[in-house]
Image: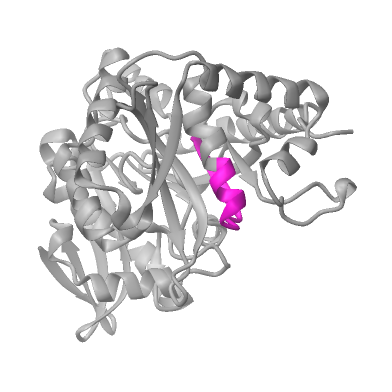
């Protein structure tokens, strides 16, 4: 940990998230929750510390924590999860072309700095602070730290609207990407209001999409597969062990080792059980063989689940349409039954629109130390945003809902 005074507060750089007091960090996270979505679980102190202690996001894997914190005496008034990176894996906002352009000009792009939840493409707060003044001071302190350690750039990924607005106000560049989210809300032309059950949801879709979903679900049922959903402490240790086998197989089938270690999910089981929902698929003989893992945001006062996030899935045997059932239809049915406002399906995937996950813009902010490259990237992002706007308009014309 390094420390330096600045004006009326002290800036401390934390190299181990587990050293932070979760009550102070999560207090800032709660203070920055400006809507009814509940507290984002992926920016909680426990989640970020687990990334480190489980050896998932550490220097050896290309993620060196240098969390920037601002203190007023012993009170934490601002903080962000800053990592110094030696690659661009596990980010989901792709800058490989930028890295190649640097290399083509004999300039180092790595190390670079990143503010994000590792391996987690979920929008949410990134600059945690007591108030607007503290948030501004935090951003300026982070930029100063990036200049001091000589990184090529700073990237603030999947940030919320307030963070993006502040970043743009001090000159950072805005980038847009597209994700696909499902909302528990009928289109106004169909009466509005939340869905009452899965059949009510199906009835809102066009005949083509409704028929396709029914066919896909029927294939899984005809294969004799059934699913059960488990929440919180009802997810047993055996369930988590099965999940990791399935999760690991999914990565290995694509030729990669999984990003997250068993120790990370063990911490989720013991320290954050209330933030997880797991669907377990059983074969005709009753053996569990497939899982999908869903994260939950919860209101800080009532504890009620408000938003669901599709995260990981896998299976030990192949069944036609199993992925759709495990990752979309089971979660959506559960969300409707439990009054969940929104289900976020993760990064990319136009195929999600056939399941009524609609396009949503997500945002990141970028600072590049090299003036000429900053200028070139700014011009590129203007063109890219125009393309994104056209892309979203095109997708809107392909709505799965009834006309």
Q: How many numbered marks have been drawn onto this rendered protein structure?
A: 0
Q: Is residue 239 above or below residue 285?
A: below
Q: Nearer the viewer, residue 363 or 117?
A: 117
Residue 391: tell me if it is visible.
Answer: yes
Question: x, y percentage for residue 355?
Answer: 65, 31
**Residue in the image at 85% along x and 33% along y:** 402
Question: x, y percentage for residue 305?
Answer: 49, 61
**Residue in the image at 35% along x and 43% along y:** 369
**Residue in the image at 19% along x and 84% along y:** 74
Q: Is residue 161 above or below residue 101?
A: below
The residue most toward the front is 285
Question: x, y percentage for residue 321?
Answer: 52, 18
Which portion, as a residue range, is magenta? 332-346
Scheme of colours in the image: one colour
Q: Nearer the viewer, residue 262 or 290?
A: 290
Does residue 340 appear to the left or right of 238 in the view shown? right
Q: Nearer the viewer, residue 214 or 348?
A: 214
Does residue 101 appear to the left or right of 163 in the view shown? left
- Residue 46 falls within the magenta-colored stretch: no
- Residue 343 falls within the magenta-colored stretch: yes
Does residue 204 appear to the left or right of 56 in the view shown? right
**Residue in the image at 18% along x and 62% along y:** 13
Residue 143: tell me if it is visible.
Answer: no
Question: x, y percentage for residue 313?
Answer: 38, 30
Figure quadrant of residue 391: top right
Q: Nearer the viewer, residue 61 or 221?
A: 221
Quadrant for the C terminus, please: top right
Quadrant for the N terminus, please: bottom left
Figure quadrant of residue 272: bottom left
């Amino acid at each position: 940990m390094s420390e330096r005074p600045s004006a009326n507060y002290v800036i401390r750089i934390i190299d181990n998230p587990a050293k932070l007091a979760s009550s102070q960090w999560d207090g800032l996270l709660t203070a920055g929750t400006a809507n009814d979505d509940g507290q984002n679980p992926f920016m909680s102190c426990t989640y970020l510390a687990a990334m480190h202690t489980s050896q998932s996001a550490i220097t050896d894997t290309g993620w060196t924590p240098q969390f920037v914190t601002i203190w007023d005496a012993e009170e934490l008034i601002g903080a962000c999860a800053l990592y110094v990176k030696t690659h661009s894996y596990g980010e989901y906002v792709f800058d490989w072309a930028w890295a190649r352009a640097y290399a083509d000009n004999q300039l180092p792009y790595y190390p670079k700095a990143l503010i994000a939840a590792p391996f987690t493409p979920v929008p949410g707060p990134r600059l945690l602070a007591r108030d607007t003044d503290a948030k501004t001071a935090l951003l300026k302190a982070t930029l100063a730290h990036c200049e001091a350690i000589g990184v090529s750039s700073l990237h603030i990924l999947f940030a919320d609207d307030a963070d993006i607005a502040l970043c743009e106000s001090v000159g950072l560049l805005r980038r847009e990407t597209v994700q696909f989210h499902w909302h528990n809300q009928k289109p106004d032309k169909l009466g509005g209001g939340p869905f009452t059950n899965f059949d009510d949801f199906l009835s809102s879709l066009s005949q083509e999409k409704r028929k396709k979903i029914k066919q896909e679900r029927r294939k899984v049922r005809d294969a004799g597969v059934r699913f059960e959903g488990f929440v919180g402490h009802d997810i047993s240790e055996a369930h988590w062990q099965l999940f990791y086998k399935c999760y690991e197989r999914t990565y290995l089938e694509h030729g990669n080792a999984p990003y997250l270690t068993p120790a990370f999910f063990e911490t989720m089981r013991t320290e954050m059980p209330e933030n997880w929902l797991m669907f377990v698929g059983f074969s005709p003989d009753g053996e569990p063989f497939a899982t999908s893992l869903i994260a939950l945001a919860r209101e800080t006062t009532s504890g009620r689940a408000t938003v669901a996030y599709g995260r990981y899935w896998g299976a030990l045997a192949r069944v036609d349409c199993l992925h759709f059932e495990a990752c979309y239809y089971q979660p959506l049915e559960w969300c409707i039954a439990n009054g969940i406002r929104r289900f976020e399906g993760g990064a990319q995937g136009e195929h999600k629109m056939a399941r009524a996950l609609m396009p949503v813009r997500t945002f990141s902010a970028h600072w590049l130390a090299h003036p000429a490259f900053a200028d070139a990237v700014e011009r590129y992002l203007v063109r890219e945003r125009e393309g994104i706007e056209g892309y979203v308009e095109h997708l809107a014309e392909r709505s799965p809902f009834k006309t």
